[in-house]
Amino acid sequence: MTNTRTDFYRFHNNDKVSLPFSAAEYDARLSGLRRIMDEAGADAVVLTSMHNIAYYSGFLYCSFGRPYALVVTPSENVTISAGIDAGQPWRRCHGDNITYSDWQRDNYWRAVRSVAGEGRVIGFEADHLTMLQSAKLDAFLNPKSRVDIAPATMRQRMHKSPAEIALIREGARVADVGGFAIHDAVKQGAREIDIAMAGRDAMEVEIARAFPDAEYRDTWVWFQSGLNTDGAHNPVTSRRLQRGDILSLNTFPMISGYYTALERTMFVGEVDKSSLEFWQANIEAHELGMSLIKPGATCSGITVGVNAFLQERDLLQYRTFGYGHSFGVLSHYYGREAGLELREDIDTVLEPGMVISMEPMLTIPDGRPGAGGYREHDILVVTADGAEDITKYPYGPDFNVVG
């Protein structure tokens, strides 16, 4: 590389390294994307989201306010990355890579244009491109027209390959490792943050052991106690555990951008009668929901079934969110396969190769007997004749009244 101040350049620094999946896996995904392009009449696609760039290229970027892209044409697939990353995007992507410099504003779009061309039909992600970047796409690419390909790419990602399912299965196993570490760390007087760190550290050690060629980032734990259990995504605090506290265990290992999860209700030392009744009712809803996950079932139909169970017990008003969602390339700050969520307004039919959670949650308001948030979470792989639960950490009071 020279010191010439070019707008963009290729900095192919050393050789490619092992990616999460084989070259054949990425080629198959790109073939699917090119079929989407053909159906939409797109000459080129400019992907900008972390999840789609990672899904089709293996490269998971770190934005820090800079834009990134994967540009796909009928013959090319090129990641576009910032100079601050040097050669890492090249080493960690399937296909070509172009680095853009920050010596002139909008060199990113000049690099994109060098692959996508001008005056063509451009596919883009309407659910990710900001208004600012959308205007720059028009200014630099001068597209003949634009077509939103985000929904079609989401549908492609919803169907997991055998290699993806193998990785997700490993993620569920690692989530269990974190769960058992948390189980061992729970005791009266311990802080939420200390228990969360025990689970996170155990998962990161196991990921590094099982995936020695991976990059390690973003694995986390939400461990909540008492009132802090009322929301599923409440951050960890320094609150100290007290006997009789309701707890919520949530472990989230991240392996090469792939998210898995374990979530369990726990109690410190003892559980009172009212709390036990709510806990057992939510477990029964959880088991019913898992029994309804099978090929041919619809997301809305499963939701109606669990709703009816809770309504019969006068508990439906305590439900806080949908009963489950898809897994794959996603995190708490990128990605979501919204077409595969267990909600009343989603009619997607489950098919073999889909991966989905069952995670009912009841929140009983503060001041009432049994107050707190009750949640169980298992990951299921839809098979030809049913579904396989790949979560192995036990649920229920026999194992989860601890400390």
Image (cartoon, rainbow, N blue to C red):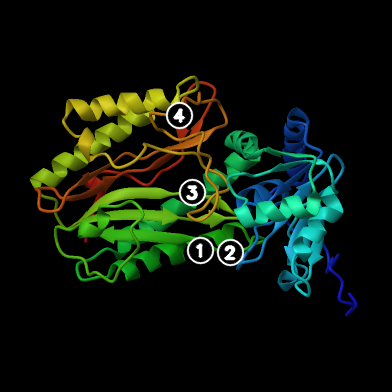
| Quadrant in which the N terminus is drawn | bottom right
Q: Image point 54% across, 25% down: which residue?
A: 351
Rounded to the nearest whole Å, what is the CA distance between mark 2 and mark 3? 15 Å
Secondary structure beneath disc 2?
loop
Q: Which of pointers 3 and 4 lies earlier in the amino acid sequence?
A: 3
Q: Residues within 10 Å of mark 1 (few under 14, many from 20)?
A: many
- Residue 213 lies left or right of residue 262; in this view the side is right
Q: Where is mark 1, residue-wise? A: 204
Say which amino acid is labelled 3: Thr
Secondary structure beneath disc 4?
loop
- Residue 63 lies left or right of residue 307; in this view the side is right
Q: Which of pointers 2 and 1 lies earlier in the amino acid sequence?
A: 1
Say which amino acid is labelled 4: Ile
Q: Which mark is residue 346?
A: 4
- Residue 181 lies left or right of residue 340; in this view the side is left
Q: Where is mark 3, residue-wise? A: 260
Secondary structure beneath disc 3?
loop
- In the rendered image, which quarter is residue 9 located in? bottom right
Q: In the image, residue 108 lies at what x, y percent?
A: 76, 62
Rounded to the nearest whole Å, what is the CA distance between mark 2 and mark 1? 8 Å
